[in-house]
Amino acid sequence: MSATDNPDATPATPPAGPVVTRFAPSPTGFLHIGGARTALFNLLFARHHGGTFRLRIEDTDRARSTQPAIDAILDGMRWLGLDWDGEEVYQFARADRHAAVAQEMVAAGHAYRCYLTPEELDAMRAAAQAAKKPLRIRSPWRDMGRERTDWPADKPYVVRLRAPTEGATTIHDRVQGEVTVQNAELDDLVLLRSDGTPTYMLAVVVDDHDMGVTHVIRGDDHLNNAFRQLPIYRAMGWAEPVYAHIPLIHGADGAKLSKRHGAVGIEAYRDDMGILPEALDNYLLRLGWGHGDDEIISRADATRWFDLAGVGKSPSRFDLKKLENLNGHYIRAADDARLADLVAAKLSLDHDDTRRSTLLAAMPALKPRAANVNELADGTAFLFATRPLGIDEAARPLLEGDAPALLARLHSALDAVHNWDTESTEAAVRQVAETAGVKLGQVAQPLRVALTGRKTSPGIFDVLVLLGREESLARIADQMTPHGA
Ligand code: GLU
């Protein structure tokens, strides 16, 4: 069936008035990277249209919705710069409102009290199983009680939606295209449980309506829910939102992203992997949305360019290498003081001002080589190492053979340098190489090992300057005697 034939299709055009989007996470203990991307798309869409981006915490699962679980979401969103407008809405606190809507629907005949007992439901389930058919509850109470007021007083009941049974419902999804479901396939879902608490399906619709949400942009695992939620809008005569269901993120192996794939909570990217928020944002943006071949996209450009038409229909695969490449770019672009602070925090040097200024001075030399904050922190090890330096196993051979003699020559050449800067130290080291008749690298390698204990480091002349004259000469002197001698 095409949408044009179908009076029950969702609007292809958005409701009039300003755009309102929302991110509606259920607290699980962390902000999932899939959720972060959903939030980002909602934020960008709202900002692009000069609209509003709201946050709703779906905290109706009381066991999981602890304060730490909620804080993990709020912190993660703040860290990623996913700044929501206004106060966040807490779904559980609105239960009375949800229940009131359900009662309104009962009063208007769009919902009904269903007194099916657990045993009767079990029998229906068994019959459906025996017939190998999916269970669709058709409650005998659906058409029993429209005019009725003499409800059984002492029996528990649930409130069910009187869902349409004929025709079809079509959604013009901005990502999935036109999707149609026969109404006969939908059942009379429960709106209020027998203890009077609202179901998730009802709460989402009431909240979206009350928050004025015009565009529901969420994971495509919710596409089926949209067909169950729409009848509630229609029953209440509420403006229907535009839907955009975005494909889920898959792991590199093509399977839906799960804990098995490693980090799925964004705090692991921040705390364990040393990823910068702007890199993760940029990566998540590109994961499922494209603007030509652009890879590096600032928040300002993303806001200018973002549209739902650019969201792909197929699941995207998470690619850690790409994220690290982007992160390297953002590290090189980042302010030195900010990076020094991040490294200081990683190394627990927050309260050590001397070391902090050393870190700051080292950032320009370190950041071109680091793909993440961990590598940046690791690269600073030589700055704070104490003599005699521990030498990496792999670097030791570079201190053998001619090395001690070359280091002795370097020591005396560098000792004669007056202005301890990169130019003068470089001139001295080059002079030693020339006089010894060897290539610069043959001198620079043992020098690097003597100064840092490693085979790789920032540029050797930067290292000399960062360590300063006295420390450099002392470290060189430590390696001038052949080992084992
Ligand atoms: N709370 C739901 C979730 O975390 C999202 C509901 C929605 O976006 O409509 O998956």
Image (cartoon, helix red, strand yellow):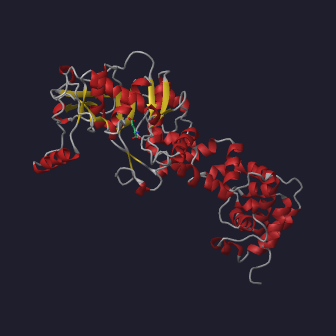
- For ligand 1, which image quadrant applies? top left
State which quadrant residue 454 falls in.
Answer: bottom right
At x 69%, y 66%, the residue is 445
Residue 286 in percent (x, y) is at 45, 39
Q: Is residue 290 left or right of residue 371?
A: left
State which quadrant residue 74 falls in.
Answer: top right
Residue 128 in percent (x, y) is at 14, 46
Q: Residue furthest top?
A: 16
Residue 51 in percent (x, y) is at 48, 22
At x 57%, y 36%, the residue is 81
In the image, 31 versus 253, the foreground residue is 31
In the image, 301 versus 70, the foreground residue is 70
At x 54%, y 49%, the residue is 267
- Up the image or down, 445 lies above or below 196; here it is below
Please indicate, yes or no, whether residue 274 appears anywhere in the rendered image.
no
Residue 136 in percent (x, y) is at 18, 40
Q: Is residue 152 left or right of residue 14?
A: left
Please indicate, yes or no, whether residue 302 appears anywhere in the rendered image.
yes
In the image, 8 versus 27, the foreground residue is 27
Q: Is residue 67 left or right of residue 240?
A: right
Q: Residue furthest bottom?
A: 485
- Up the image or down, 47 lies above or below 192; here it is above
State which quadrant residue 253 falls in.
Answer: bottom left
Q: Quadrant of the C terminus?
A: bottom right
Number of labels in the image equals 0
In the image, 306 versus 134, the foreground residue is 134
Q: Quadrant of the N terminus?
A: top left
- Up the image or down, 463 lies above or below 277; here it is below
